Image: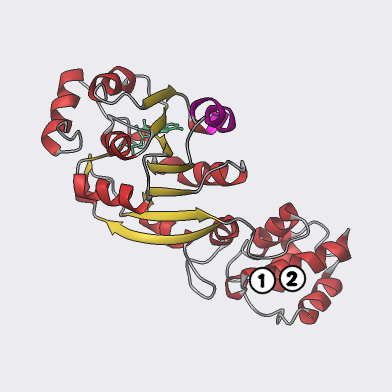
Amino acid sequence: MNKDIATPGRTREILEKYGFSFKKSLGQNFLIDTNILRKIVDVAELSDDTGAIEIGPGIGALTEQLARRAKKVVAFEIDKRLLPILEDALSPYRNVRIIHQDVLKADIHRVIAEEFVDVADIMVVANLPYYVTTPIIMKLLTDNLPIRGIVVMLQKEVADRISAQPGTKDYGSLSIAIQYYTEAEKIMTVPRTVFMPQPNVDSAVIRLMKRKQPPVDVDDESFFFQVVRASFAQRRKTILNNLISNLPNGKAMKEKIERILTEKGIDPRRRGETLTMEEFAALSNALREAMH
Ligand code: SAM
């Protein structure tokens, strides 16, 4: 087996060889701990029939581990300076394809159709650039891609919000958006010392397994998410006051909104963070009927 890229010594050697300087603005914190990398890959449950999509391969620390376990790895990297480094560091692996592109602008459906013709399933596995974790995850989920799930490293604080349950301080519109599409599980927290350079926040690994069906019946998804966002707009306000202030026509509909909340068994004085996803679904279905 080839020498791992993700040791401190080998990483330093590669960076020095190419005179590479980290760009903070691109969230460049590379992993230098092979145990953490193996754990990430284990949790993704790859088989030699799996296609893996990586976002931001850096110098290939995770890419290499994925290449050893998956059938094929397709990785999107925005930083042109990393392309020759990746080509060199990953030269022993024939099953890796690097695409030089901002993943947020990529047509991932097309890439999947072209690159993964004969795979059994597809997993996204990445150590995400922290400045764009939420937009990347939301794109992967709302684009309706044929993926089994996502295993990613991100800021611990965002991982806590994603996996939060009703009634906790971390629960909010992000928890609901992601748990609507996936079963979300925080796998482990990760110390700063496993990165080069060390980020100034703590990190965590989460696993998001895509649901076959949403967990609740929603008549209009975009209105459901509008109601959820409105309900959390000001966390200290009651659900009634948030809906009045933040839904279009909310003020004119005050009595109606109050009546619907009561009809659905939701005390108008409760705060958004106490409502379950089922309650938000029932509420948004009833509001939609009354408002449209
Ligand atoms: N996977 C490597 C590792 O674990 O060592 C590097 C991870 S580093 C946290 C994030 C990587 O994402 C960097 O290589 C950075 O250049 C790349 N990146 C940042 N923004 C990106 C974007 N919008 N699309 C694709 N790659 C991006």
Q: Give the magenta part as a residue range.
A: 104-115
User: The residue tagged with tag 1: helix, strand or loop?
Assistant: helix
Res. 88 visible in picture = yes
The picture places residue 106, in percent across and down from the top left corner, at: 54, 28
Tell me the distance, in whole angstroms, between the alpha carbons under discs 1 and 2: 6 Å
Q: Of the numbered discs in the image, which one, if any, rests on residue 282?
A: 2
User: How many marks on residues?
Assistant: 2
Q: In the picture shown, does residue 115 fall above or below 143?
A: above
Residue 127 visible: no
The residue indicated by pointer 1 is 278
Asked if residue 36 lies left or right of residue 143, the reply is: left
Q: Is residue 34 left or right of residue 70?
A: left
Residue 29 drawn above or below residue 178: above
Residue at image coords 54%, 73% = 166
Q: Quadrant of residue 280?
A: bottom right
User: Which of 275/254 is in front?
Assistant: 275
Image quadrant occupied by the C terminus? bottom right
Percent coordinates x, y for residue 4 in the rendering = 17, 35
